Structure formats: C-alpha cells, structure tokens
Image (spheres, rainbow, N blue to C red):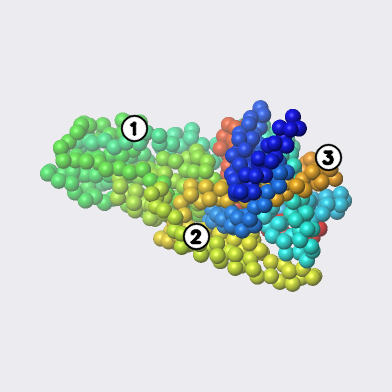
Amino acid sequence: MDFLIDSINVHLRTLFAALPISALFLSLAAGYTIGKIQFGRFQLGGLAGTLFAAIIIGQVGVEVDDNIKTMSFAVFIYTLGYVSGPQFFQSLGRTTLDQLHLTVFAGVIIFITVWCAARFFDLDPGSAAGLLAGATTESASVGTAGDAIANLKITEQEKLRLQSNIAVTYAITYLFGFTLVIFFTTKIAPRLMGVNLRQASKEFEDAMGGPEKDLEDGQSEPLQDVRARLYRLTEKSFVGSTVAYIRESSKEAVHVVQLYRGDGQIKISPTTRLEHGDLVALMGPRTALASYGPQLGAEEGTVDGIQLIDETRDVVVTTRKLSGITLAEAKQVVDPAIRRGVFVLRLKRADRELKIWRGVMLQPGDVVTLYGPRDSVDKTARDIGYSVDPSKGVDYVYLGVGIIVGMILGLVTVPVAGADLGLHTGGGCLISGLVFGWLRARKPTFGSLPATTALHLRDYGLAIFIASVGLASGPHALTLLEEKGMLLPLLALITVSVPLLTCTLYAHRVLKMPPPVICGALAGVLTCTPALNALVSEADSEAPVFGYTVPYAVSNVILTLLGPVIVLAV
C-alpha cells in the first residue's frame, strides 16, 4: 500500500511540475464530485468540496501562479457585486428598513463573537479570518482577509502561514457552520418564536393576498394558461361600449388586444367604441375567456388574414416608480393603455420563483415574465425596466473597465496605527461591481452582462480562487489541525449560534418581523442559500424568500469587508 501511495505521489509531482495548472482543474473535478455526495438531506457542495480536495492534493506540493489566484478572485468579487448592486442600493430605502437594520445588527454581533473567540482562544489573524469566512459561509472573506495579510509588515514565510490558516480554518468551520445554519433556521428559530413554520407561512401568504383571495375579487394572476380568442360582437349590451369598459368589467382578467371592422384592422385605444359585427380579439386566462367571451357573441375559429402575434419576455424591474410597491399597486402605476393585454406569468427573485400575490412588493432586480401582444409587451418592458435578451453577449469593455477600476481602488491605502489600511483587490472590486451593477440597472442601454453569464463567472472565479488557496495551503494544513483541530468545530458552533440566537430574538421581539421572514433573513445574514432551500421545503411556501434577498445582498458586502477588519483587529 505504501508503495502504491508513493508511486501516485511521484506521478502527480511529475504531472504538476510539467503542468501546474492541471492541479486546479483536478481539484475542481474532484471537489465537485465530493460536493454531490448525499448524506441524508445534506450535501457538502462544490466549493467546500473543492477546498477539501485542493488541500489534500496540495500535500504533494504544487506551485500555482499568484496571478491566477488574483485574477479569479477579482472576477468573482466583481461579479458578486455586480449581481448584488441593484438589490444592495435598494435595501437602503424605507421599505426594507427592518431587514437592513437586522443585517447591520448581525454584522456587529458576528464581529464581536469572532473577535472574542480569537482573543479567548488565542487565534492568530489567519485562523480568526478563516473562522469568520467558514462559520458564516462567506467565501469572499477568504480573499479579502488574504489580501490584508499580504500587506502586513511581516515576513513572507509568516504571511504564507497565516494565509494557509485562513483556508484550513475555513474548510473545517464551513462544514459545521453550514450545517448549523440549516438546522437552526428550520428547527430552532421557529421554536424560539413559538410558531409552526408551515402555519406561520400560510398566515403570511394570506396577509400578502394569497391566491385564494385573488380568485375571489377577480385580480388573480397565476396565469399558467393565458391565450387569445376571437369573438364576433353581436350582443346589443356591448355595442357602443369602450375597450376600457371590457377591461374594467372583467376586473382586468380580459383585455381587447386587436379589433377588426369590415375588411381591416383598426387602431384601438381605451376610448375606442365597439360596433355590431366587429371581430374582437380578447386575451386572458382560459377560464376567464370561457366565461366572459361568449357574452360578446359567438367565438370565431381561424379567420383568413388575421394573425394574433403574442410574445413571452423576461424583464428586469429597475424603474424607481415600482420600487417598494405591491403588484396590485403596480397595476395602477403602469399606464393601462401601455400594458393592454399584458399579463404577468412569473416573478423571480434571487433565482427563485415567487407566487404572484397582490401584496408582493416589487424590488429592483426582480425578473417578471410578461405575456401578451408583442407591441404591448415591448412598451410595458420599457416602462418597468429592461428586457433580458439571452442572445445578447457580454460587454467586455464595461466588464474590463469595471474590474480595472476596482483594482485601482484597491491600491489606495491610508496609514493607520502603523499599518496600511486599504480596500485591496477584494474590497475595491466589490465596490466597483456594486456601482457598475447599479448603473447598469439604472440605464440598461450599455454594459450588458446577462444574469446567467454573471452567475457563471462568479461561481467559476470563486472555484478557481478556492482551489488556488487550497493547493497553496496543503503543506501547512496538518500543522494547524494538530494545534487547533478539535477546537475549530466548537468555535464554528459558537460563531454561528450566538448571532443566530441574538438576531432571532431581536427580530422577533424588537423589530416585530413576521416569523417566516425572520427565518429567511437569518439564512441571508449568514449568506447560506442551502438554508433558504431547506426553509422553503420545510415551510412548503416561498414566504422565507421575502426575508432573504436584502440581508443576503447587504451581508455579502459587510462580511466581505469584515475579513480585513478581523485581520487588523486580532
């Protein structure tokens, strides 16, 4: 067996000496394979798996170019900021004040907890920063803390040791922090608040104007089956009525989208009056058309020369007038003449589809799927934000300038207490990404970076960075584990449980937030998306999502910037 292990080591050293970059992709392949292994309902995940794999592979001894690590981290942190930008700046408004308040409060508690743990258990700056990053599942802190250590006035050997301690501590504490966040948010937090999560979520849905209420007053928009039908107007009660009357009398369930009179189509407006014999094209949910359409007259089948052209389009909400208002209020804000015949099929936030309730508040960055006549969809899309065009490529000029600006910001330092304080690459690119993402959302005529592409860049950049860190840390991993190995899981549990317990009680008793929103916010402040997925499953509802997005966006910024602060404070 020893001979086999030695033989593998020799062959790996030969491969890595000839192709050092192969170690990165081996770490990714092995790490994501490990991350997919299911332990009951638990999965480690690709990033944590990559770090573990890289640390093990790094025992062989691999030299990875620091420029690769810097470049991948810059791409990751910039796209993280870019994706979060619209949501981050929106969170500074009044409509999400409680969630912003809770997130800042959580950041303070997390800092105090990590600082006290470092002082009491004599952790070095690297281990303390790794504890922050791992327990809170904030991978970006690994990079910003590493940047801060690289600028300390200590020997290169000591810098390497501290940076290795970040990675190893992160790897160990991530596993325990990740697990505890899921368990606490789904099981412990509801018990502390004295609620049944599923029942509390149902009550929250009712308060938001759930689907049952929508159906009662005709405002329903869970439109899985929207279609258009042609009716020949023969009923005298509708002769002389306006296009607007059709919309109003059907409680906006049915819209006139085209009108044909004689041999041709006529242009319609809300005040256009219908005449006997008109061919009226109605659009709406199938059930609404079946009950309302025959009131006009008989349904017509295929008519020569008439083509109903409809379109489905994803649109990102960016306009200020829709920020912080409900879907029901949005109907009044968007001009009915513009949105005639346009229906909302889906609403997505943080890559999760939400139920379409009247009380759902829109936020910048939400993606709504519109369906209706092409012209009306186009006008409505321009009025509420910008259309997502999957075929549109990346504006590499905007991307490149954004990352360069972030790196330049990172070069600026201020001497404080004998140390050079600065944002470094991580902080600079994060702020640049936030601003450039916000600018793109405000004026989407430039800087194209499709959401799916941005997410792929973010995940790929982070995976390469984590693999680079793990490979460099491999030779030092055993030393730290021998010194602090048994202590690290305990510190992770403390670092997670203290903020979660404090924030639960504070949000419930002081801020008076709804319990499902609190549970989602707890997952957000610790940037744990798997916890949100578990919450949605446990609650059998999307209600926790309404508390997740703002804390997640803000906490990503706070915890990323806390990395260097912890290094300097400890």
Work out whether mark 3 precedes mark 2 in sequence or the reverse, and give the earlier one. Answer: 2
Mark seen at residue 286: 1
- Comparing 104 with 296, the one in front is 104
Taking the spot 50% from the left edge, 62% from the top edge, the residue there is 400
Taking the spot 44% from the left edge, 58% from the top edge, the residue there is 395
- Comparing 401 with 562, the one in front is 401
Mark seen at residue 486: 3
Question: Are the residues tagged 1 and 2 within 8 Å (C-beta)?
Answer: no
Work out whether mark 1 precedes mark 2 in sequence or the reverse, and give the earlier one. Answer: 1
**Crowdedness near tag 3: few (<14), some (14–19) or many (≥20) residues, C-alpha within 10 Å:** few
Query: Element at badge 1?
Result: helix
Mark seen at residue 399: 2
Q: Can I make out residue 351 in this image?
A: yes
Q: CA distance from mark 3 to mark 2?
A: 44 Å
Taking the spot 12% from the left edge, 44% from the top edge, the residue there is 263
The amino acid pointed to by label 3 is Met
Mark seen at residue 64: none
Query: Element at badge 2?
Result: helix
Across and down, in percent, residue 517 comes to: 62, 42
- Comparing 175 with 526, the one in front is 175
Q: CA distance from mark 1 to mark 2?
A: 44 Å
